[in-house]
Amino acid sequence: MTGPRPSPAPGLRAALAWSQTLLVAGGAIGLVELPYQWLSELGFRLQALWTPGGPAERPWLLLPLVLGTALFLVLAWGPLAAGRGGGITGVLVLQNASGDAERTRAGASLELRRQLVRLPLVALTHLAGLSVGTESPSAALGASMLLALRRRFLVLQQLPVALVAAIGGGAGLGAAFRSPLLGAAYALEELSAVHGLPLMVPTLILGGLGGALNSRLGQPARLAEGMGAALELRLLPLALLITLVTALLGVLLVRLLIPLSGWLAQRLRDRFRWLTAVGITLSLALLAVLSGGLSLNDGSLALGPALAGAPATGWWAAVPRLLGPLLSIAIGAPGGLMHDSMTLGAVLVTPWLGALPEQQQAALAGVAAAALFSGACRTPLFCALFVFTLQGNAVLLPWLLTASAIAAAMGRWLGGPSWNEVQVEAFRTR
């Protein structure tokens, strides 16, 4: 006779529990990110209709822009105010919460039902073509999903709430862009007060599992085939000049955004807020018409060709790519600075590089995108990896890292508080 089957060793049981939890959580994060990808794809398909005839041939294109922006302002500054902004402030506050009350408020801002409040605003954002991407909302959704699963899985309860939120945020971004390394870098540099294996390993695993369930929808700037040319040594002085100029513009972007958002917030709360809302709606519509739709969305339709060495924008393109994000982010559109800052850097420099070979134009566009991004956000590893993820040029990565490091140092030296630091301070003073 055979005796009772021995139970698995405690170490094996723990490993099985972690494996099952990570498998379920990775799949859940990947699935919940899909609606954001679909909405983002809708926005880009509408934007693509603006060329070559634009609203002159298709006047109906103005309807989703105007009606979507107007309805967004009504809801975002009214019953759905909790869904404004990128959504990751709660993750950042949790990392250094000053007490139980603040920790509770931060956790409440990341409850999964809060993302249901955000979803109509995300839909209107992409329907109207407001100039933000899905990066921050994707990270916030990942954090919310993993925190919700923490209530049901004992192995997740063994980790601090702040660490779970950071892992979920990084995994959410990694899943949305099908790049677990990118999500891990984001969690490491931006989201978490904890570094090392407890953060990196689960973020990489969850981002990889979630990314397997996602698609290329809503990512037109990501090149189907990576670039392969190194930056020529003779162009290094030009690359350094581009780094310095675009880093300063990244600093300027944030320095303009902070007071503009405060000023518009006051205007959208006073008794004449409807006049402000009409002015914002008409301004965004006029900007789209004058730029032929270039000011819409996060700029990926211009960024992709620039990173491929085939830019399709004029010398004036930086103006709508600066003004569109300033207005959109300032009014609380769910998104952030990431793709917008990369696009601004690329379209600023590529019109002046036409005499260079195509591969060198692409390389310098990547340097400009990384430098402006890092000057604004001050996360050099993440910024360089994001441009690398889109462009796929491995031999350019050292120069992307160098440009991002220089730009981040300039941002810290000249920039004052970052955009995320201002959001955290506003959360704590409410």
Image: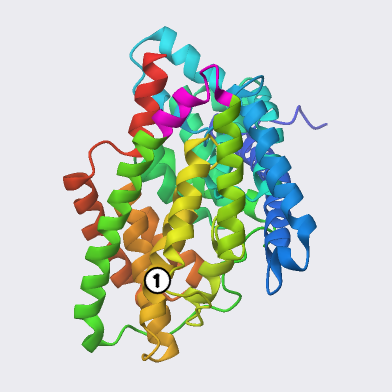
Q: Secondary structure at mark 1?
A: helix
Q: Is residue 361 above or below residue 85?
A: below
Q: Is residue 108 above or below residue 224?
A: above
Decide whether residue 264 is among the magenta residues: yes
Residue drawn at (38%, 64%) of the image: 345
Decide whether residue 305 is among the magenta residues: no
Horizontal and vertical percent for residue 324? 50, 51
Horizontal and vertical percent for residue 366? 39, 71
Quadrant occupied by the C terminus: top left
Return the residue found at the far top: 101
Task: Report the predominant secondary structure element of the magenta stretch.
Answer: helix
Residue 334 visible here: no
Q: Is residue 197 above or below residue 60?
A: above
In this picture, residue 330 sits left or right of residue 368: right
Residue type of the residue flagged with mark 1? Gly
Q: Is residue 321 above or below residue 311?
A: above
| Residue 358 position by quadrant | bottom left
| Residue 322 position by quadrant | bottom left
Quadrant occupied by the N terminus: top right
Residue 332 visible here: yes
Horizontal and vertical percent for residue 14? 57, 32
| Residue 246 position by quadrant | bottom left
Q: Nearer the viewer, residue 25 or 264?
A: 264
Residue drawn at (59%, 23%) of the image: 81
Residue drawn at (40%, 29%) of the image: 262
The magenta region covers 261-273
Q: Residues within 10 Å of mark 1 (few under 14, many from 20)?
A: many
Count of picture labels = 1
In this picture, residue 262 sits left or right of residue 108: left
Residue under numbered circle 1: 366
Horizontal and vertical percent for residue 240? 21, 72
